[in-house]
Each structure stands twice: as structure tokens, then as C-alpha cells.
Image: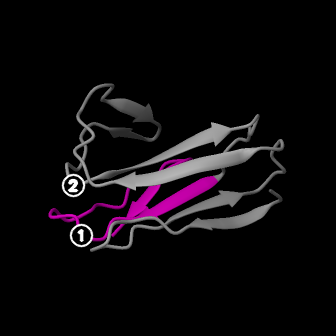
Amino acid sequence: MLQGTYLFPLGTQAFYNPANLIIHSAPSAGSVLSQYLALDPGDAGLPIPDPPVEIYDRYPDGYWSMTANNGFRLVISVINMTAAGFADTIAMLQGDKTHFRR
């Protein structure tokens, strides 16, 4: 992977829930395993401090999983995900590292 935007075309048969990984500095070699799961992620590990905001709740409609593989390492500059098919209205969370949108 080089610097740039990488689309992960994820989702379910009913809804398209893509994720974009935007890389500003060259990562180490490897790959990223990704999936969207239409399951309640639960609230274990919450709240998560992400100054200047805090993530204190979750949406039970689904979640994304992205895992570094084969030695892949980088500091993520931006990741954005589209939450199609979520029952509740999705608020835009903006921290240094996290952006969710509907």
C-alpha cells in the first residue's frame, strides 16, 4: 500500500456499508482484513476517549472490523464509514482519528 485512499466495499446483501482508509504516510508492507458485521457490537470497553470527544455509546445495528495482517502497520490518518441501514440517526463524530457518517 502506498499513500492514498483505499476503498473497502463492505456491507450486507441489503445495505452498502463501505469504509475508506486514507493513508497520509507510507505504511509497512502487509494487508488489512476487513468485514462489516450486521450485529450489535455490545458496549464492552466503552467509553473510549478520543479527545476532544468521547465515544460513550454504540449503534446496535452493526459494526466494521479491520485487522492488520502480515506485518501491516501504520498510523491511520483518517477512516470513514457509511452506516446505511442503521435504525437510529447517525451523528458525525469528529476526532483526530474517527469519522462516522450516514
Residue reaching furthest to the left: 87
Q: Residue placed at 53% from the left, 51% from the top?
A: 34
Residue 101 position by quadrant? bottom left
List the residue tagged with mark 2: 61
Mark 1 and mark 2 in contact? Answer it, CB < 8 Å.
Answer: yes
Residue 65 vs 24, above or below: the answer is above
Q: Measuring from the top left, give residue 77's x and y in whole percent.
A: 66, 51
Q: Earlier in the sequence, mark 1 or mark 2?
A: 2
Residue 42 vs 32, above or below: the answer is above
Q: Residue placed at 70% from the left, 41% from the top?
A: 75
User: Could you tell me the amino acid type at mark 2?
Assistant: Asp
State which quarter of the image contains the N terminus.
bottom right
Give the label on residue 40, or none.
none
Give the label on residue 85, or none.
1
Residue 35 in view, yes or no: yes
Q: Which residues are magenta?
A: 78-102
Q: Measuring from the top left, give residue 28's x and y in whole percent.
A: 83, 41
Residue 79 position by quadrant? bottom right
Residue 90 falls within the magenta-colored stretch: yes
Q: Measuring from the top left, give residue 30's x and y in whole percent.
A: 77, 44
Q: Is residue 65 left or right of residue 60?
A: right
Q: Is residue 98 left or right of residue 26?
A: left
User: Could you tell me the amino acid type at mark 1?
Assistant: Gly
Q: Residue placed at 55% from the left, 47% from the top?
A: 97
| Secondary element at tag 1 | loop
